[in-house]
């Protein structure tokens, strides 16, 4: 690789926010060519690693982290301008200063690690005074199957949140939940005809952005009635088999011709009912579902 190609690659890495890879490229380029510049590249690489560690541990403010990244980027570009220079007469980025800076960063990181370790051995952090929970709901088909209407509430131990509407993005936000319920088992309660089949976290302490999978509960209507034999006297048809809507619900009459069955359809819906008696079909008509009607059905001759 020529110095022009290396410089082009370096600038592309920096443009792609890959400062670590850029520092590694410089370190490898100066190996055997310029010890001082290789040391400078190593110092920049260590600064990048230390900064990543600080950010990961929450030990540096975002503004300070951005400022340090900008300084590192500038130093990488300045060192990249010296790709053709292999003599030791001109020193690039002051190595001693860079190393001193990195030692200071390492001290800060070490102090942070000691603090975190001590904090873990101590008493647990007090819960917040209150907290919010954002809920995302979708159907059984996955995250693309958003549920965009309805009402839901949360149960956190003994605490019941106010009922919230699901918005057009399939979300609802529950705010100002008392902090003492942060670690309590969390449940979602749909106020419509849904049941919860999966959730992404067991408590708000695990996550305050939870996703729930909801599955519709089918409408069910309980119907009751009597089946009679044809002819005078209204004699009961014992042992008759009822088949509603092609097997959606079935029942067998008792010795007095009575039946009861739960049909997975809403009241007011109409669907075909067939009744077999003694091996023959003796009834085939449409029936409108109702929970308040005691159906009186007479078999065909």
Image: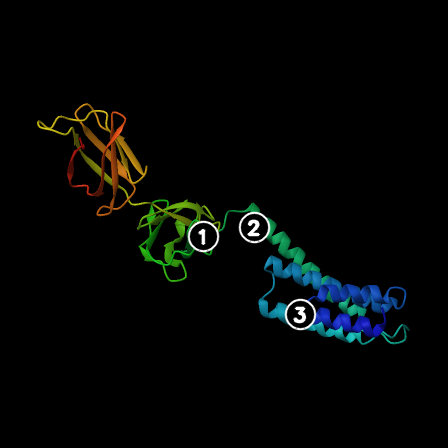
Residue 231 visible? The answer is: yes
What kind of colouring is applied to the model shown? rainbow
Q: Which mark is residue 252?
A: none
Q: Which mark is residue 119?
A: 2
* Residue 258 spot, x, y in % from top left: 18, 29
Which of discs 1 and 3 lies nearer the camera? The answer is: 1
- Crowding around mark 2 (Cα neighbors within 10 Å: few <14, some 14 to 19, many 20+) is few
What secondary structure is found at the residue carrying circle 1?
Answer: strand
With 290 as the anchor, is 116 left or right in this view?
right
* Residue 103, placed above or below residue 193: below
Contact check, label 3 and label 2, Cβ < 8 Å? no
In three-dimensional space, the C-alpha distance between marks 3 and 2, rounded to whole angstroms, equals 28 Å
Which of discs 3 and 2 lies nearer the camera? The answer is: 3
Viewer-side residue, 245 vs 23: 245
Viewer-side residue, 62 vs 260: 260
Residue at 64 percent across and 60 percent down: it is 54
In three-dimensional space, the C-alpha distance between marks 1 and 3, rounded to whole angstroms, equals 37 Å
Viewer-side residue, 228 vs 20: 228
- Crowding around mark 1 (Cα neighbors within 10 Å: few <14, some 14 to 19, many 20+) is many
Q: Disc 1 designates what residue?
A: 211
Residue at 78 percent across and 63 percent down: it is 24
What secondary structure is found at the residue carrying circle 3?
Answer: helix
Contact check, label 1 and label 3, Cβ < 8 Å? no
Q: Disc 3 designates what residue?
A: 68
């Amino acid at each position: 690789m020529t110095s022009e190609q290396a410089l082009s690659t370096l600038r592309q890495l920096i443009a792609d926010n890959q400062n670590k890879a850029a520092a590694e490229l410089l370190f490898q380029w100066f190996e055997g060519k310029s010890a001082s510049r290789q040391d400078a590249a190593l110092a920049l690489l260590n600064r990048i690693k230390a900064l990543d560690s600080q950010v990961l541990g929450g030990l540096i403010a975002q503004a300070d982290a951005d400022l340090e990244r900008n300084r590192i980027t500038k130093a990488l570009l300045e060192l990249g301008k010296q790709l053709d220079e292999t003599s030791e007469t001109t020193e690039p980025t002051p190595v001693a200063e860079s190393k001193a800076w990195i030692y200071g960063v390492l001290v800060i990181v070490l102090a942070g690690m000691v603090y975190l370790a001590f904090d873990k051995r101590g008493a647990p952090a007090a819960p917040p005074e209150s907290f919010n929970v954002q809920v995302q709901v979708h159907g059984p088909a996955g995250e693309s199957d958003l549920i965009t209407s309805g009402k839901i509430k949360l149960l956190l131990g003994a605490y019941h949140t106010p009922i919230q509407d699901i918005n057009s993005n399939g979300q609802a936000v529950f705010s100002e939940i008392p902090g003492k319920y942060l670690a309590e088992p969390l449940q979602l309660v749909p106020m419509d005809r849904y049941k919860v089949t999966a959730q992404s976290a067991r408590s708000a302490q695990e996550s305050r952005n939870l996703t729930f999978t909801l599955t519709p509960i089918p409408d069910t209507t309980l119907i009751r009635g009597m089946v009679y034999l044809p002819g005078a006297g209204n004699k009961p048809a014992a042992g008759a088999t009822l088949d509603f809507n092609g097997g959606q619900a079935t029942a067998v009459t008792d010795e007095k011709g009575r039946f009861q069955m739960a049909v997975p359809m809403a009241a007011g819906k109409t669907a075909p009912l067939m009744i077999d008696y003694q091996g023959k079909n003796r009834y085939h008509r449409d029936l409108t579902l109702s929970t308040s009607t005691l159906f009186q059905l007479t078999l065909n001759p």
